Structure formats: structure tokens, C-alpha cells
Image (cartoon, rainbow, N blue to C red):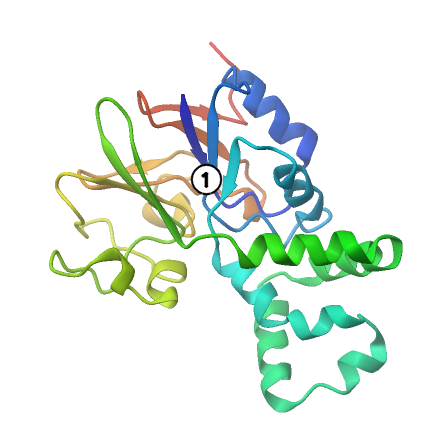
Amino acid sequence: MIYATSDLHGYPLDQFQKLLKQANFSTQDFLFVLGDVIDRNGDGGVGLLQWMMGQPNVELILGNHEAMLLSCAFLFDEITDDSVASLDEKQVRLLLNWMNNGAEPTIRALRDLRQKNPEALDDLLEYLREAPLYESVSTEKQDFLLVHSGLGGFSLEKKINEYTADELLWHRPQPDERYFDDILTVFGHTPTRCVGNAGWMFQTETWIDIDTGAGHGGAPMLLCLDDLRAYYAHQEET
């Protein structure tokens, strides 16, 4: 079975593993995480990322929060008060943008990781640099496009590799926005509360939003692509 989740934003690893158990997720299954593992809560998602790195059946698709982290990679040579004080104007803008989007717990956890195991920090950054912006996946019943935020500037004539990173990382589609008729696009980024369906996935004829608000005090979900069954961390198995 193939699963997708998104926007974990520092959700506790042990609680996320309970959600996987609820779906009977096993080594025979595959999980796509559609970005934004980091920032806002707990250890900033650093523990989640390290766990994902050790799972051969889990793949990260880059989110805008991971992209912001990478844009501030200059911090991680040595994260100190002095290094922050010496930033140039462009670096300050990048860092402020990230900080305004919940970077503090992530930076704190990365500072600790750097002190304890610099090689582990380097491995984590390389893992993020290698993460794709999208994946195409097929089941017996349906073809899927998996991406972090939907498709900004969508056109049927536009090839997926022609989209800019910003169009795949920062777009917020309106409920009446249509994508491909023969491919179901799955993404997160926009909490479903923004489209009036707080805590539950939001589905249209051509796309599904699976950001159920873990970054804002809610909990994540899993979507099984084989049968479109949804599993929610806030809902007991019935």
C-alpha cells in the first residue's frame, strides 16, 4: 500500500508512529511525506527527519519550510550568536522570513545536533538537498501527482518540470481551482481549516489537500492512495 502525509511540523514522533500503526503500516508499504516536517513545535521536526532518513520505505518531498531551512544553510557552519550577528542584508532577510514562519525550535534542535554530532547535521542537510519537489505515483486504480502546495500558474499545456520551485512550494489553491482530469494531485501546505474543513482532508474532483493542521495545534493524517482511505491521528480506529 502507498500512503501520503504532510505538514507534520514537529509533531511528536511517537504519536506519528501510533498513526502509522493505526493504518497497519509495515515494511511492505511506502510512505510519501509531502514536506514541512519541520518548524513550529517540539524539536522542530528534527527527530522526525532523522527517523525518516533511516526508513527505506519513506520518502520526503520538499516543503517550503525545508526550503527556507536550506536558504539559511549559512547558519549551520557554526550556529552561534556571533555568526548571527555577522549576517549580511540578504541573509538577514532569509533568516527573518524563516523565523517568522516558526524556525526557532528547529534552529535550537539543529544547534544541539551540531554540538553532539556535526556529521549527523551534515547528513540531515544533504538529505534535504536531495529531496525532490514532486513525485508521480500510480496505483491499480489511479495516477497521482504528489507535491507540497499544489500547482501555481497551472496550465494543461505546462509540463511539471516547467513549474518553478515557488509554484510547487508556496501556492494556495482556491476550492474551485481545477488541475488534471486524469491525475489526482495530492498536497498539503494550506491547512484544510482555510477551506472550511478543519481537521479533515479536503477533496475536489481533481485534487486533495491533506494538511489537517498539525502545525497549528491539530494533528496529521495519512491518506492511503490505493483506496483513498483516510486515517486521522485525532480519531480512534472504528
Q: Nearer the viewer, residue 218 or 169?
A: 169
**Residue 51 image point, x, y percent:** 67, 37
Q: In terms of depth relative to the viewer, which is nearer, 28 or 166?
A: 28
- Report the residue marked by disc 1: 212
Q: Residue at x 66, y 47 (%)?
A: 45
In which quadrant will I find the N terminus? top left
Percent position (x, y) of residue 186?
33, 41
Extreme residue toward the bottom, this view:
89
Which of the two residues, 133 or 194, is positioned nearer the viewer here? 133
Question: Is 201 located above or below residue 41 in the figure?
Answer: above
Residue 152 visible at all: no
Circle 1: residue type? Thr
Residue at the image position 44 percent from the left and 53 percent from the top: 132
Looking at the rendered structure, the secondary structure element under dot 1 is loop
At a point 31% along the width and 20% down the height, the residue shown is 227
233 left or right of 123 in image:
left
- 161 up-or-down from 208: above or below: below
Name which residue lies at 63% across and 72% down: 72
**Residue 198 is drawn in which quadrant?**
top left
Residue 40 in the image: x percent, y percent?
63, 54
Task: Locate residue 231 relative to residue 155 in the image: left or right.
Answer: right
Please indicate whether residue 136 sits to the left or right of residue 119 in the image: left
